[in-house]
Image (cartoon, rainbow, N blue to C red):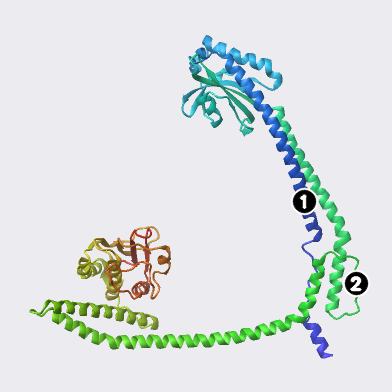
Amino acid sequence: MEKSQTKHAASPTFDTSTPSRLAVKIAALLGLSMFLAVAVSGMFVYRKNLELILMNLQNQLQLAANTIAISIDGEMYQHLRGKESVNTPEYRQIRKVLEEFVASNRHLGFDPECAYTFRRISPDSLEFTAMLHDQYVGNRYPVRPEMLPALERGEPGFTGIYEDENGVWVSAYAPIFNRSREIVGIVEVDFKDNVYLMATKKEIYWIIFFALLGIGMAVLIALLLNRAIARPIVNISRAAIRFSEGDLDVSVPVSTRDEIGMLARAFNYMVKEIKEKEIIRRQNRELTEAYARLDALNRSLQEANRLKSEFLSIAAHDLKSPLQVIGGFAELISNTPGQHADVYRNAEKIRSAARRMLTIINQLLDTTAIESGRFTLNKEWADLGELARGVVEQNRALAERKEQRLAFSAENGCRAMVDPRRIVEALDNLVNNAIKFSPPGKTISVGVQKAQEKGGANGAVRLRVEDQGPGLSREDLEKLFGKFTRLSAQPTGGESSTGLGLSIVKQIVELHGGKVWAESRGRGRGAAFIVELGGGHSA
C-alpha cells in the first residue's frame, strides 16, 4: 500500500493543454496555399496583360512623338531660347503644332500637360522650350537615361511605366532635326494616369480581393476540420495518459489512422514514464564519476605544473652563476691586448652565447616568478622618456652591427608610477625583437608620448616601438603574446628566440595596470608594438 501511494505521488502530470491549436495551423496552411495560388496566377495574368498594355502605350506614344517632331521646323526651333522666345513668331508656330496635335487626339488620352519639347543646355540638364503651359517655359529639367538615345544619337525612345509625385506615367521621345540633320531638341509625349494604366491597377485590386476571399474560406474549412479531427485526437491523448497512470481497462475506439503527432505524443509519454528515472540515475552516476576523474586530473596537472616551475627556477638559478663567470672571463679575454685575432673572435662568440643564455634564463625566472606570485614591483615616479632613451642607447651597438638605424623621440613630462627595472626589461625585449626581426638597412623607431587618442587612459603615456620588418599576419596577431609562441616571421640575422619575451612584456605591463598591443598593416609592411601605462605627476 505504501509503495503504491509513493508511486502515485511521484508520477508527474502530463500537459494536456493545446495552446497551439490545430485549427489555427490548418487555417494558416490552407490560407497560405490559397493565397499563393491566387496571387501567383493573378500576377501571371497581370504581368501578361501589363506587357501588352505597355507595348500598346509605347507604340502609340512613339507614333505621337515622331509625328510632332516631324511637324516642327528644326530651323525655327534652334533659335528658341526659353522664356525670351515665348512671344516670337517661331515659338507661336511650334506651339500651334502642339495645340493641333492635342486637340485632334484628346479622345485617345492626350491632354495639354503631356506634350512638350526640350533643348539641351548642359550634359545633364534640359530646358523646356515649347509647351502649352507657357509659364513653365525656360524651367530646367534633369536628363533621364531614357532620353539619351534621342539627345545623342537621334533615335526615338520610350520608358516603361513609372511613378512620381505627379502620378503614373509612360513617356516617349523623338529627336528634332534641322536641315543639316543636327539634333536641336527633343519632343516628349506622356500618358498620365491613362485608362489602360488604371485597368492594370484594378487587376491588382482583384487579385488582393480573391486572395483575401481564399483566406476566409481557409479559416472556415479549418473550423470544420477542427470539429471532425482535432477533438477525437485530444480524447485519444487523454485516454493514453490514463493508461500510463495504471488504468489498464481503458479502451479507445480507433476510427482513423491520421494525426500521428498527438498519438506519438501520448506514446512517448508512456515510454518516458518507464525509462526516464533509470536514464537519469545512469547519467547522474556517469557525471559523478566523470567529475571525480576530472578533479583528480586537475590536481595532477596542478602538481605537475608546480614541479615544472620549481625545477625551472632551481635549474635557472644554478645555471646563472656559471654563465656569468663564463661571460666575465670572455669579456676579460676580449679586453686583454696582444692576443691573436682568432682569440678575440672566439671570445666574442663565447660572450655572445653566454649573454643569450643569460637572457633565456632571466626570462624563465621571470615566467616562473609571475606564475608562482613571487613577482614583485618596486614602483616609483619615473620619466619614461629617459628610461626608453637608455634602452635605445643600450641596443644601439647591436643595431649598428646589423646596419640598422635606431630613431628615438620623446615628449617632455611623460612620467608614471612604475618599477623602472621591469619597464626597462619590457622595453628592452621589444627593441631587441625589432632588431632581431628587421632586415639590415632598416630603421627602428622608438617613441614616448602622452596618449591623446579617444579611448586612451586619462594621463596615460604610450611607448611605441615600430620596425620595418616582415610584418604580422592575422594569425600572428591572434597568438602574439602567448608563451613559447613561434611566429611566421623568422629572425633576419640567425638569432634564436624562446617565444617568452612578448609573454613577459604583456605580464609586466598588466601588473602595472597597463596594456600592450601590436599593429601591422600586413605581411612585409612592418609592425608596431604599443605599451600604454597610467601616467600623471608626482606630488
Residue appearing at x 14%, y 82% in the figure: 332
The residue lying toward the viewer, choosing from 362 and 486, is: 486
Vertical relation: 45 (above or below) 189: below
Most distant residue in the top direction: 89
Residue 252 - label: 2
> Which amino acid type is marked by label 2?
Val
Drawn side of residue 518 relative to residue 161, left or right: left
The residue lying toward the viewer, choosing from 291 and 187, is: 187
The residue lying toward the viewer, choosing from 353 and 9, is: 353
Q: Quadrant of residue 283?
A: bottom right
Most distant residue in the bottom direction: 2
> Which amino acid type is marked by label 1?
Ser
Instruction: Count up the numbered dots.
Output: 2
The residue lying toward the viewer, choosing from 424 and 263, is: 263
Location of residue 213 in the rendering, given as x and y in whole percent from the top left corner = 81, 45
Residue 97 in view in this figure? yes
Crowd class of label 2 (few under 14; some 14 to 19; many from 20; radius 10 Å): few
Location of residue 418 in the rendering, given as x and y in whole percent from the top left corner = 30, 73
The residue labelled by disc 1 is 33
Tag 2's secondary structure? loop
Crowd class of label 1 (few under 14; some 14 to 19; many from 20; radius 10 Å): some
Instruction: Work out whether mark 1 precedes mark 2 in sequence or the reverse, and give the earlier one.
Output: 1
Residue appearing at x 21%, y 71% in the figure: 394
The quarter of the picture where the C terminus appears is: bottom left
Location of residue 207 in the rendering, given as x and y in whole percent from the top left corner = 76, 41
Residue 460 in view in this figure? no
Vertical relation: 352 (above or below) 211: below
The quarter of the picture where the N terminus appears is: bottom right
What whole-number distance in Å separates the C-alpha atoms at marks 1 and 2? 34 Å
Residue appearing at x 27%, y 80% in the figure: 357
Location of residue 524 in the rendering, given as x and y in whole percent from the top left corner = 34, 59
